Image: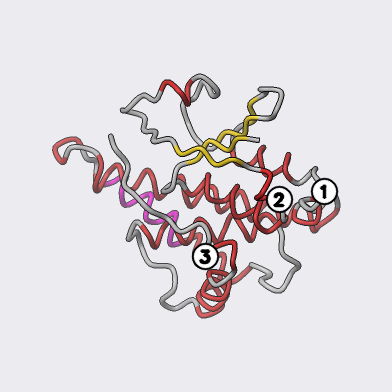
């Protein structure tokens, strides 16, 4: 299987960390592609009409996207099933945490548009403030509500890769005043799956 990947995408890294944790990373051929809403990549559009990574291309040529769907697919394979609970409270807790992690990335990307990526004259400070509030509220929720002692699941993987990306991009810090979240994140960051998938590179708009 080909994993269309980008070394600075939190969504792509989530998939690759998932594959490592499931013991199936060796089944993936990682193909690096640069994408941006303002910099068309025809190779990526050929497999995903949204022009975004990650995309998983199966041996028969079928393409699966986005990261949530890819992780669900990998979770159906031998080795991956334990990372996506199949029912009950455990499933909804894992999927909810994954959704929150996705939202952290979405808010962080939007914040970067209003502080770094968009031409300064076109930036809208109230939107930057709103995205910052989403991040801070989410950090506080994670500190209060997350069961960091639950068996490893897709939500933990999504959260760790999201927080690592926020740190990589120097977005609002999540560790100060949140000791539970900070301790869990630092411990998770030492896992071989995380150390094998370090962020690198810049977005080319």
Alpha carbon distance from label 2 to label 1:
8 Å
For label 1, the crowd category at 10 Å Cα-Cα, with few meaning under 14, some 14 to 19 and many 20 or more, is few
196 relative position to 76: left or right: left
Residue 7 appears left or right of 1:
left
Q: Is residue 195 above or below residue 92?
A: below
Return the mark for residue 24.
2
Going by the image, does 100 lie left or right of 61?
Answer: left
| Numbered badge on residue 78 | 1
Q: Is residue 193 above or below residue 43?
A: below
**Residue 6 in picture, x, y percent from top left:** 45, 42
Q: Residue 195, which numbered label? A: 3
Magenta-drawn stretch, dominant element (helix, strand or loop): helix
Q: For residue 158, what is the image quadrant?
A: bottom right
* First in residue order: circle 2 vs circle 1: 2
Q: Position of residue 153 (x, y in %)?
A: 71, 59
As measured in the structure, the alpha-carbon distance from the residue carrying label 2 to the one carrying label 3 is 16 Å
Residue occupying the point 63% across, 26% down: 63
Q: Are marks 1 and 3 in contact (CB under 8 Å)?
A: no
Compare marks 1 and 3 and give the one earlier in the sequence: 1
Q: Residues within 10 Å of mark 2 (few under 14, many from 20)?
A: some
For the point 53% across and 35% down, the residue is 4
Region in magenta? 126-136
């Amino acid at each position: 299987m080909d994993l269309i990947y980008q070394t600075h995408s939190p969504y792509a890294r989530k998939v690759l960390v998932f594959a490592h944790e499931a013991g199936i990373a060796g089944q993936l051929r990682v193909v690096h592609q640069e994408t941006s809403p303002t910099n068309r990549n025809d190779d990526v559009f050929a497999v995903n009409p949204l022009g975004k990574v990650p995309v998983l291309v199966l041996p028969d040529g079928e393409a699966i996207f986005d990261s949530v769907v890819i992780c669900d697919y990998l979770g159906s394979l031998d080795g991956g099933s334990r990372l996506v609970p199949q029912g009950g409270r455990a499933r909804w807790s894992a999927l909810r945490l994954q959704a929150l992690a996705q939202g952290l990335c979405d808010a962080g990307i939007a914040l970067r548009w209003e502080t770094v990526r968009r031409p300064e004259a076109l930036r809208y400070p109230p939107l930057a403030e709103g995205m910052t509030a989403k991040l801070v509220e989410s950090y506080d929720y994670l500190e209060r509500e997350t069961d960091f002692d639950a068996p490893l699941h897709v939500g933990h993987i999504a959260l760790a890769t999201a927080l690592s990306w926020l740190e990589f991009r120097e977005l609002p810090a999540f560790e100060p005043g949140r000791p539970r979240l900070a301790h869990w994140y630092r411990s998770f960051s030492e896992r071989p799956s995380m150390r094998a998938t370090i962020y690198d590179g810049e977005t080319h708009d």
